[in-house]
Amino acid sequence: MSDATLFEQVKDEANRVDPYPLFARLRETPVSRQSDGTYVAATHAAIGSLLHDPRISSETLPPADRPKTGNPISDWIVKPIRDRITDTHRPFIFRDPPDHDALRKAVMHEFTQERVQLLRERSHVLVDEILDKHAGSTSFDIVDDLAYPLPVTIICELLGIPTEDEPQFHGWATQLATALEPDTMADTEKRSENSRTFETISEYMTGLIKEKRRHPKDDMLSGLAVDGVPGIPRMGDYDLIATSILMLVAGHETTVNLIANAMLALMRHPEEFARLRDDPSLAPRLIEEVQRYDPPVQFRTRRALADIPMGDVMIPEGADVILLLASGNRDPAVFTNPDRFDPDRGGIRHLGFGGGLHYCVGAPLARFEAEVALTALARRLDNPRLQADPPPYRPGSALRGPKHLRLSVDGIRRA
Ligand code: HEM
């Protein structure tokens, strides 16, 4: 029986630098009940099985409850109606079939080869521009200077959001991403703050979607707004707003963390950085290994729709279940020397993009963005060194990445 406070310790910011020893202890019991009543799945096999189990739901968000304003019309008429609308039009990462599948299918329909290829080419241009701007610098923050601006510009261009509006999303996206943190969802004040942010960003998206329906352009939001997918009704405004917010938030924080986590691993393994510089074709494998070794999404929460027996443990109906993806990725039953950073592992079955119905739709984007960024960094940074090891981390435990990753460099070469 493992310690029932282990997951509490995972969430504790004091363990942010290295939660992996805690995961090893959690894996001693494939599924364990924690003292707060949640169940944690920690082995690769248990997580894999639950990711594909139809008795596990993604509808984990508590009912919407906007803060009261003191105005009786708003509080007793408008608010309950808007709360009900929000409850029935959640972003599809928080929805189950059949709604989930229809919304996801519409998005996948818009993820065309041509769009992905064009954005890949754009990434090369953007990364070169960013590094050229810093040529001559002797200090470079991987997070602020590159890992943040690249994915944000790409997701805005994919969706068709004017890039000049992007700065206002930074705070909103960071705030909304906390919906993945269990402690945020358990805290009324933090939930209200999230609701307010959701409303602000919804207002922005409502205007943008109206514009896309009227004057569609060649971008994903226009496609979703005007095109239908055969056999699926066109998305209504509320679902389109929720979907665009989901894409924007999911495309913000996660890829930033992938690039930063990868660069941190490379700075700690300079021989791998040198190999990448000499042979850029190693990048795709290296990125898969980072997604295994130090994944930006460490866990996701689900809810049991029925009693689910898992070995000696019965997950009771209604219980929250944490799928500890980052722990499955270090499971010695699946990976030899799991705590070793080894980009030469072939065909790895990591859980860094999830699995099953909710497998990440943005994985191709995240992969090429990281590939373009890392190969350019390896080619152009002259003698990079970490200024702080460990770096300061972002506070959340579900989304993992450094707040800053400052490097000293002898120079940044021209493209
Ligand atoms: C390194 C970067 C990324 C990582 C590590 C990541 C990870 C994940 C994971 C683990 C899931 C599964 C969630 C679950 O099972 O509940 C997921 C779902 C999702 N991701 Fe990503 N993601 C990344 C980048 C992106 C990007 C760039 C986009 C948008 C373009 C995106 C959009 C989504 C969406 C919409 C879902 C929900 C899919 C569904 O519910 O069917 N992700 N992602």
Image (spheres, rainbow, N blue to C red):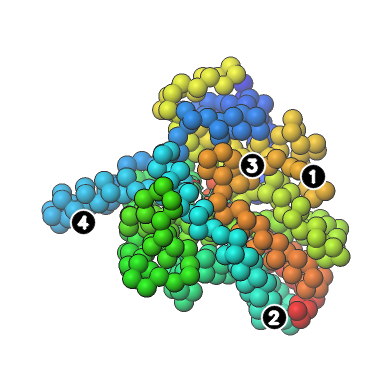
The quadrant in which the C terminus is found is bottom right
Q: Which residue does the numbered mark 1 point to in the structure image?
A: 346
Mark-to-mark CA distance, 2 and 3: 35 Å
Q: Find the residue positioned furthest to the left.
A: 72
Tag 3: residue type? Leu
* Residue found at x 52% / y 66%: 158
Tag 4: residue type? Thr
Tag 2: residue type? Asp
The quadrant in which the N terminus is found is top right
**Displayed quadrant of residue 412:** bottom right
Mark-to-mark CA distance, 4 and 2: 49 Å
Q: Where in the figure is residue 194, as x and y percent of width and height?
A: 38, 54
Circle 3: is it few (<14), some (14-19), or many (20+) Cα within 10 Å?
many
- Label 2 near label 4: C-beta < 8 Å? no
Judge: label 3 CB < 8 Å from ligand 1: yes
* Residue found at x 42% / y 66%: 222
Q: Find the residue positioned furthest to the front.
A: 230
Q: Which residue does the numbered mark 2 point to in the structure image?
A: 132
Q: Earlier in the sequence, mark 4 or mark 2?
A: 4
Q: Which residue does the numbered mark 3 point to in the structure image?
A: 351
Front in this rendered view, residue 396 or 199? 199
Q: Earlier in the sequence, mark 2 or mark 1?
A: 2
Find numbered disc 1 in the image and state the secondary structure of the residue it sits on.
Answer: loop
Tag in front: 2 or 3:
3
Front in this rendered view, residue 225 or 27? 225
Q: Earlier in the sequence, mark 1 or mark 3?
A: 1
Find numbered disc 2 in the image and state the secondary structure of the residue it sits on.
Answer: helix
Q: Earlier in the sequence, mark 1 or mark 4?
A: 4
Find numbered disc 3 in the image and state the secondary structure of the residue it sits on.
Answer: loop
Tag in front: 1 or 3:
1
- Label 3 near label 1: C-beta < 8 Å? no
